[in-house]
Image: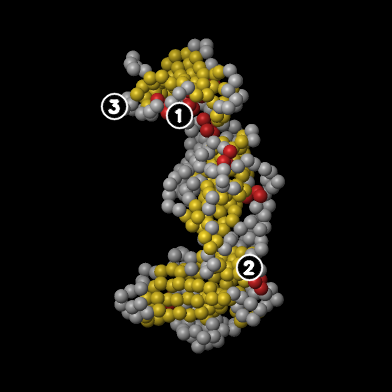
């Protein structure tokens, strides 16, 4: 984790922590606003922050300060939650302020919060600044005059349609920053992802499960639901309510299935992307949409098809070598492995079936024609890889060959196809795998003359 002491402020009288999330912003007209905490709240004084407005233009500019919080008159942000009382935060000029001579009125209430009283001092609606000139003012952090307290949450200051023209103050409970809800899986133990077939995860990375998070957990991945029907959607929100930034790969989302006491990697998305920093008070939400058949692709989130009912886990990878994950159940029919429409059966007897695949390009000069064969074998290979249906359907030509074998209830199924893989179909040597209660052998052979 990376310390962010300047952006985080503990408000001891109320047991809250405040952070300046996006502690500054710029505008298209050349204004640059930067903010920093000056002092925390005490029994004698509200918390204070300093704001600076600078002219980045090479010419004298008139800025409309009524669009530049906290230099606008009556700077405030409102928090509304369903079923809860509204709460607001105000940034009010202190007594000695360069843009106003009016003194602020405020008071400390029994909750420990400092609140605005009356009308805040008026600041000008516009301001002329020379090139590279700036103006700096200090502001009190106050609750609304009609509010009983200041609730935890995100307070967005600025244009509601253009969040970049503004900043955010986030409040959370200092001693109990963790999720407020309970998990239906509380008390359940699961093995680490490092014990699965997902090579991305390291044994050195500890697991941080949502169902094990408690009130003191500072960073956690929270699902919008721990149960969903296929097709359906679950949102996963990674929250950082610590004093430090956490750093990771935002594209390293993984979906794993839990079966017979083990995790199986279903949909890895290990893309090498620029790192992502989740600052104190920050959240990141990823949508997982699940389907029984082909997925419906959307612009955001992760869309996964060919899923059956069962227990799964979603992970956003590792942030600072800590794996954040949430377990959930999908309600739906079991997934059945069947061959795709790309294969056509060309030969069959009592114990074997052969099909030709339309995959591959016969006109490609590097393509080779070969066979991919799956056969049932005796169950005396205890150390072989085990697959679940959701993995098989993502592996070609394994899906077609095993699907043919199961559909026709034979001992051997062969798929003929063109491939660019080297070795042939990606199989270097004869291999074995387990599926459900059976053991199977995979072998390949090149065919020199298709005729």
Tell me residue 251's x, y (percent): 47, 48
- Give 65 or 392, whichever is nearer the viewer: 392
- Give 129 or 121, whichever is nearer the viewer: 129
Report the quarter where the N terminus lies: bottom right
Seen at 58% across and 70% down, the residue is 9
The vertical placement of 445 against 156, above or below, is: above
- Most distant residue in the bottom direction: 101
The vertical placement of 332 against 219, above or below, is: above
Asked which secondary structure carries label 1, the reply is loop
**Residue highlighted by disc 3:** 365
Proximity of marks 1 and 2: CB atoms separated by less than 8 Å: no
Res. 144 in view: no
**Residue highlighted by disc 1:** 396
Seen at 47% across and 77% down, the residue is 71
Tell me residue 4's x, y (percent): 52, 65
Dot 1 or dot 3, earlier in sequence: 3
Report the quarter where the C terminus lies: top left
Res. 8 in view: yes
**Residue highlighted by disc 2:** 16
Tell me residue 167's x, y (percent): 49, 68
Colour scheme: secondary structure
Query: Label 1 crowding class (10 Å Cα cut-off): few <14, some 14-19, many 20+?
Result: some
Tell me residue 176's x, y (percent): 66, 61
Dot 1 or dot 2, earlier in sequence: 2
- Give 274 or 321, whichever is nearer the viewer: 321
């Amino acid at each position: 984790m990376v310390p962010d002491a300047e952006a985080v402020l503990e408000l001891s009288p109320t047991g809250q922590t405040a952070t300046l999330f996006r502690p500054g912003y710029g505008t298209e007209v050349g204004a640059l606003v930067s903010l920093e905490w000056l002092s925390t709240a005490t029994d004698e004084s509200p918390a204070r922050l300093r704001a600076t407005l600078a002219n980045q233009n090479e010419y004298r500019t008139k800025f409309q300060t009524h669009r530049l919080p906290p230099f606008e008159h009556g700077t405030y942000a409102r928090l509304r939650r369903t079923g809860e009382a509204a709460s607001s935060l105000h940034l009010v000029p202190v007594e000695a302020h360069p843009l106003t001579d009016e003194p602020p009125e405020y008071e400390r209430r029994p909750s420990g919060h400092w609140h605005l009283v009356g009308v805040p001092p008026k600041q000008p609606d516009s301001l002329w600044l020379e090139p590279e000139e700036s103006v700096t003012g200090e502001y009190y952090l106050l609750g609304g005059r009609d509010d009983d307290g200041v609730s935890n949450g995100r307070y967005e200051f600025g244009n509601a349609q253009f969040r970049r023209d503004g900043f955010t103050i986030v409040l959370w409970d200092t001693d109990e920053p963790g999720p407020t809800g309970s998990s239906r899986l509380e008390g359940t133990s699961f093995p680490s992802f490092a014990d699965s077939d997902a090579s991305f995860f390291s044994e050195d990375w500890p697991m941080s499960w949502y169902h094990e998070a408690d009130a003191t957990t500072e960073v956690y991945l929270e699902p919008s639901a721990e149960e969903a029907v296929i097709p359906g959607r679950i949102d996963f929100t990674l929250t950082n309510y610590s004093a430090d930034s956490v750093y990771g790969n935002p594209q390293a989302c993984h979906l794993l299935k839990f079966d017979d006491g083990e995790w199986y990697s279903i949909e890895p998305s290990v893309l090498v992307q620029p790192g992502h920093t989740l600052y104190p008070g920050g959240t990141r939400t990823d949508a997982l949409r699940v389907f029984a058949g082909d997925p419906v692709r959307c612009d955001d989130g992760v869309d996964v098809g060919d899923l059956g009912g069962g227990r799964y886990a979603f992970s956003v990878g590792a942030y600072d070598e800590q794996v954040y994950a949430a377990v959930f159940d999908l309600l739906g029919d079991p997934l059945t492995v069947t061959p795709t429409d790309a294969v056509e059966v060309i030969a069959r007897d009592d114990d074997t079936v052969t099909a030709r695949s339309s995959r591959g390009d016969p006109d490609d000069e590097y393509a080779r024609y070969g066979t991919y064969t799956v056969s049932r074998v005796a169950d005396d290979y205890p150390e072989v890889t085990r697959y679940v249906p959701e993995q098989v359907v993502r592996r070609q030509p394994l899906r077609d060959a095993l699907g043919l074998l199961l559909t026709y209830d034979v001992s051997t199924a062969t798929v003929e196809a063109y491939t660019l893989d080297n070795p042939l179909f990606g199989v270097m040597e004869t291999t074995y795998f387990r599926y459900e209660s059976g053991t199977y052998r995979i072998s390949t052979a090149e065919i020199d003359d298709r005729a």
